């Protein structure tokens, strides 16, 4: 049970870090580092045979990868909206 709590804390910290990287930095690659590392780790875990390729083990990995990749896309959309809002403010001041 304690391991599960630690896992949720680590996942939460990683999601916050990824969100900040996606929304604050110009390059989309910075926000993609964490999801790509998680995807690479997932492939490694299953390819090495440390975890059997069964549905009950595969499902949590799919969920985690989907959440992190979706969070990356959402963060990039928010970054673009923030940039557009800032551009509109600058244009309004010029008029």
Image (tube, grey):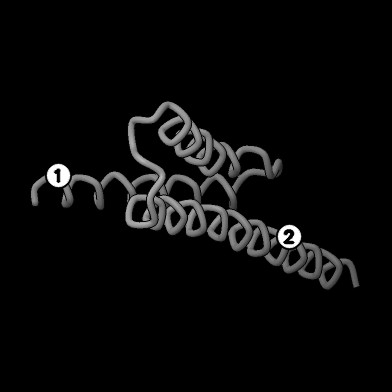
Quarter-wise, where is residue 84 in the image?
bottom right
Q: In 3D space, how far apart are the residues under numbered discs 2 and 1 (Cα atoms)?
A: 40 Å
Name which residue lies at 29% across and 44% down: 10
Residue 24, horizontal then vertical, whole percent: 59, 49
Which residue in the protein does label 1 denote? 3
Q: In this view, does 46 lie above or below 48?
A: below
Which type of secondary structure does the marked residue at label 2 adopt? helix
Q: Residues within 10 Å of mark 2 (few under 14, many from 20)?
A: some
* Residue 23 located left or right of residue 52: right
Closer to the camera: disc 2 or disc 1?
1
Q: Residue furthest left?
A: 1
* Residue 37 located left or right of residue 93: left
Reading the chain from its start, which is encountered first: label 2 or label 1? Answer: 1
Which type of secondary structure does the marked residue at label 1 adopt? helix
Which residue in the protein does label 2 denote? 83
Residue nearest the viewer, comparing 84 with 90: 84
Residue nearest the viewer, comparing 78 with 63: 63
Name which residue lies at 17% across and 50% down: 4
Quarter-wise, where is residue 59 in the image?
bottom left
Q: How crowded is mark 1: few (under 14 residues within 10 Å), some or many (20 or more)?
A: few
Residue 58, horizontal then vertical, whole percent: 41, 51
Residue 13, horizontal then vertical, whole percent: 34, 47
Quadrant the C terminus occupies: bottom right
Image disc number at residue 66: none
Name which residue lies at 59% across and 58% down: 75
Name which residue lies at 44% across and 45% down: 17
Q: In this view, does 76 lie above or below 28?
A: below
Residue nearest the viewer, comparing 53 with 42: 53
């Amino acid at each position: 049970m304690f391991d599960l709590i630690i896992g949720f804390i680590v996942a939460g910290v990683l999601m916050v870090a990824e969100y900040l990287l996606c929304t604050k930095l110009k390059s989309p690659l910075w926000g993609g580092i964490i999801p790509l590392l998680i995807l690479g780790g997932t492939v490694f875990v299953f390819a090495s045979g440390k975890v059997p390729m069964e549905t009950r083990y595969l499902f949590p990995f799919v969920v985690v990868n989907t959440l992190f990749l979706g969070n990356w896309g959402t963060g990039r959309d928010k970054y673009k909206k923030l940039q557009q809002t800032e551009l509109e403010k600058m244009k309004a001041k010029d008029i």
